Amino acid sequence: MTRNASIWARIDKLSVVIFLLMIVMGWLNIYAAVYNEEHTRILDMSQRYGKQFVWIIATLVIAVFAVVTDSRFYFFFAYFIYGGLLLLLVLVLFLGKDINGARSWFQIGSLNLQPTEFAKFGTSLALASYLNARRHDLRKLSVFLTATAIFMLPALLIIMQPDMGSAVVFFALFLVLLREGMSPFVFISGVLMVVLFFFTLIFNNLYLNGGLIILAFAAAWFVVRKWKPVLAGILILIVAILAMTLVNKLIFKSMSDERILFVSALLSGAAYSIYFYSRKALQLLVIYLFLIGSLVFVNSVDFTFNHILKPHQKERIEILLGMKSDLHGTGYNVNQSIISIGSGGFAGKGYLQGTQTKFKFVPAQSTDFIFCTVGEEWGFLGSLFVIALYVVLLLRLIMLAERQRSDFSRIYGYCVISILFIHFFVNIGMASGLLPVIGIPLPFFSYGGSALWGFTILLFIFLRLDASRTEYLV
């Protein structure tokens, strides 16, 4: 009893206060988003706000259990928890209930549970346990690949449901790997892939391929600071292009300009490999390999965009990039959300006074688009306050993570930070029309028991680890 009392005394009070404030504000906004004049009681269990209250009470109980559980339990049973949640992700593919085209839910009586939300804390525990055991030496390829596989496996199972939005969240754990020693080059490469993906959709592929080649030569000059090898490389490329153009006219007669440029880059690199070898120009070789990888990626995006993404996902990206306008179809939700947020002005229309909210113009307003209710009824000031809450919470969690004596606790803390950040950033971004709509909830605000419980467990396990940071886990 004394030890538990000591743990409660050491629990981070600021994080708990922000958590409580968020779930109460979320509940009030859910009430506003689905307000029904025939059911005005906020505790009406036939309405979403009544059900959310029950889930909030259960959340508080879950938070207490997460705190009173010995921190060594999370350390020693991390892989068991992870394995159990992976099993649930497999089972839901066969036994789950199909909702909106995704088999992501277990139906238990009137209760629907989404194992994806709980897989986030299980994956975080497993990743922290693995990196702690391996002394987070992420510059070793085997360690990097194993760590990546830990969070890619649940992501792939979630993609099979299919639920692309929730799967994207797990990629945020690359931020943890970056913090723990992963080469920044790997992270930068990932960011560049995302940029190239969108550039490929906006610009002509031939021009984009040419631009990448020009950038590669510029980078080569910057590295060697000599014109002779760079000009030699340009000359070899030109000869290769002329030769491939001639071969195409005489033999193939069907190669596109993009294909000719790509094959020419491959051939010229092979011819230039003698220079790479003789001069031991490793940096130039890296630039060349990066160029070839970029060209392969750019030329494969068309296949990905047209054959892997679903039609509504393609439309959302096209609308975001201004390639298509569909205010009454796929773009309806985002357009109405932007109108709602903008109509709130500086101070908002007042609680329960939002016209966009009251007349149900925005679908999924209590879940994925809960932030537009904040924008309309609380205005710029209210939106800024909500954003500030998240920023303060994230900064506080970073501070807590950095003061951990245990590598396991610090790594898990950064997992929590990364997951909360990606949810916060993407949800508000998609509600504001700045990011594609991928359908993920706003932590502690959006309607839903699974998400609320999952985020609560995720957060309070870390607060429990922080409260016992002076103790040794092993």
Image (cartoon, rainbow, N blue to C red):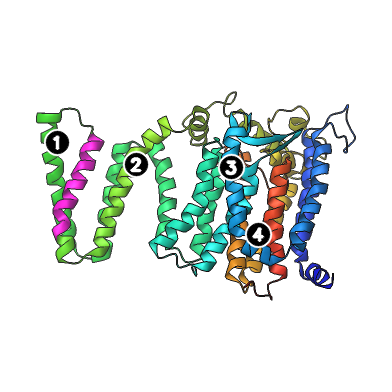
> In terms of secondary structure, where does tag 1 sit?
helix
The residue mark sitting in front, 2 or 3, is 3
**Residue type indicated by callout 4:** Leu
Q: Which residue is mark 2?
A: 298
The residue mark sitting in front, 3 or 1, is 3
The numbered mark at residue 245 is 1
> In terms of secondary structure, where does tag 2 sit?
helix
Residue that appears at 77% across and 32% down: 110
Between marks 2 and 4, how big is the CA–CA gap?
35 Å
Q: Earlier in the sequence, mark 1 or mark 4?
A: 1
The residue mark sitting in front, 4 or 3, is 3
Q: Which residue is mark 4?
A: 394
Q: Which residues are magenta?
A: 257-274
Q: Which residue is mark 3?
A: 89
Residue 273 is left or right of residue 34, and the answer is: left
Between marks 2 and 3, how big is the CA–CA gap?
32 Å
**Residue type indicated by callout 3:** Leu
In the foreground, 221 or 155: 155
Residue that appears at 39% across and 61% down: 141
Residue 185 in picture, x, y percent from top left: 40, 60
Q: Is residue 433 visible?
A: no
Between marks 3 and 1, how big is the CA–CA gap?
51 Å
Packing grade of label 2 (10 A; few <14, some 14-19, many >=20) is: many
The residue mark sitting in front, 2 or 1, is 2
Q: Are marks 2 and 1 in contact (CB under 8 Å)?
A: no
